[in-house]
């Protein structure tokens, strides 16, 4: 299961969603744009990281889009997705 915290004006959020959608991978999106409670939830889960997206795969905090793409480039993302 993939959970992604996003904001509605975030180009990296769009890229992350496109990455998963193009690969047919389902994800849950939590928009924190106007939801203070969900923003606080994201901050707690991501150890205070305020940037979006914040991506969690099977409960593991991956980080943002660049972090996810670094895992993909290193060949480690597929194993995490299969998790």
Image (cartoon, helix red, strand yellow):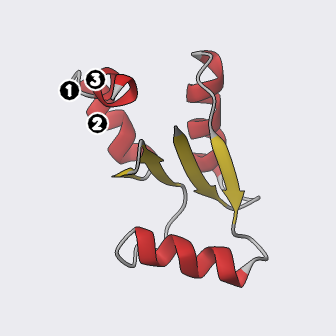
Give the residue drawn at x 42%, y 42%: 57
Q: Which residue was labeled with disc 3?
A: 79
| Quadrant of the rendered image containing residue 25 | top right
How far across and how far down the image is residue 38, in percent?
A: 65, 74
Say if 36 sits above or below 62 in the image: below
> Disc 2 or 3, which lies upstream in sequence?
2
**Left or right: 18, with 63 as reference point:** right
How far across and how far down the image is residue 69, in percent?
A: 37, 34
Residue 70 is labelled as: 2
Q: CA distance from mark 2 to mark 3?
A: 14 Å
Question: For numbered disc 3, what is the local secondary structure?
Answer: helix
Question: For numbered disc 2, what is the local secondary structure?
Answer: helix
Q: Which residue was labeled with disc 1?
A: 74
Give the residue drawn at x 62%, y 37%: 27
Q: CA distance from mark 3 to mark 1?
A: 11 Å
Q: Tell me the mark number nearer the camera, choosing from 3 and 1.
A: 3
**Left or right: 13, with 43 as reference point:** right
Question: For numbered disc 1, what is the local secondary structure?
Answer: loop
Say if mark 1 contacts mark 2, CB within 8 Å.
yes
How far across and how far down the image is residue 55, in percent?
A: 47, 50
| Quadrant of the rendered image containing residue 6 | bottom right
């Amino acid at each position: 299961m993939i959970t992604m915290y996003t904001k509605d004006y975030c180009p990296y959020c769009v890229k992350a969603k496109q990455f998963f959608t193009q690969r047919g991978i389902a994800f849950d999106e939590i928009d924190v744009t106007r939801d203070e409670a969900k923003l606080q939830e994201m901050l707690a889960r991501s150890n205070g990281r305020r940037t979006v997206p914040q991506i969690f795969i099977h409960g593991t905090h991956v980080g943002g889009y660049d972090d996810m793409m670094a895992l993909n480039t290193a060949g480690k993302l597929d194993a995490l997705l299969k998790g």
